[in-house]
Structures are given as structure tokens and as C-alpha cells.
Image (tube, helix red, strand yellow):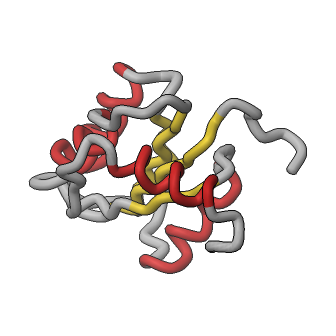
Amino acid sequence: MEGKLENIMVTVVMPTFNHEKYIRQAIEGVLMQNTDFLFELIIVEDCSTDNTKNIALEYADQYPGIINVLTSERNLGITENYLRSVEGINGKYIAVCEGDDYWTDPLKLQKQVDFMEANSDCS
């Protein structure tokens, strides 16, 4: 697809709404990934009424080459909010981590990409 960054292997999409209590742990779980490839994180913020947006933007400022935050002026709901992330995806693969979830394995993405690359018939 034209316009995609060629070096990004995985785009992590993080839909979020009112996840102030959890968003830091979710973001940190993505940032701790130990990979031999580049990945990006797109936080799709759905007009939260708590501090979720500010926390996400704080991380984006700290990690400008890795984290991008898509904001909304009105609540779109889970499906429409997730679908708008598609415009910003640069990776060959997509991984999803909801804003109230987190990853504990620092090799999660590496294991998944290694498997996908070794098994092209898998989707």
C-alpha cells in the first residue's frame, strides 16, 4: 500500500476509552517488547471523559517515532473507533492491545512475527 513506512513490521493498535487506571500499564507492555524489527503503537482514543487522552499524549511526546495518538471530538463507539485506526497502519502485521489490557511477555511480538514469517499459509 502506497504511503506506508517500509521498515515497520508490526502496528499495535490500542483502542481506548476511559482507561485512565490502566492505560500506562497497557502502553508499557507494548514498549517493553524486545524485537529485532521495528513496531509502532497507534492509540485510538475515543473522547474519554477521564485523563486517558492526556496520558496517551504524554507517552506520544516521549516516544515520537513509536507512538501516535488518534483523538476524536466525539465518542464514536468501539467499532468505529477501531476502524479509524486503519488509516494510520504502517506495519505488515497488526496486533491489538486494548487500553485496559496489558502484555506480560516481552517477546510476545517477536514470537508471533517469527511464527507468521515461518508459516506464510497462516493468517
Q: Nearer the viewer, residue 15 or 118?
A: 118
Q: Nearer the viewer, residue 23 or 32?
A: 32
Outermost residue on the left side: it is 21
Percent across and percent down for residue 35 are: 43, 33
Using residue 5 as the reference point, say whether residue 116 is left or right of it. left
Using residue 80 as the reference point, say whether residue 47 is left or right of it. left
Percent across and percent down for residue 72 are: 49, 57
Using residue 103 as the reference point, say whether residue 41 is left or right of it. right
The residue depicted at 43 percent of the width and 62 percent of the height is 96
Q: Nearer the viewer, residue 14 or 9?
A: 9
Outermost residue on the front side: it is 118
Using residue 1 as the reference point, say whether residue 81 is left or right of it. left
Percent across and percent down for residue 62 are: 35, 20
Residue 83, placed above or below residue 47: below
Percent across and percent down for residue 25 are: 16, 46
Count of marks placed on residues = 0
The residue depicted at 14 percent of the width and 54 percent of the height is 22
Quadrant location, the C terminus: bottom right
Residue 39, placed above or below residue 123: above
The residue depicted at 56 percent of the width and 46 percent of the height is 10
Residue 120, placed above or below residue 22: below
The quarter holding residue 15 reads: bottom left
The quarter holding residue 16 reads: bottom left
The residue depicted at 78 percent of the width and 40 percent of the height is 4
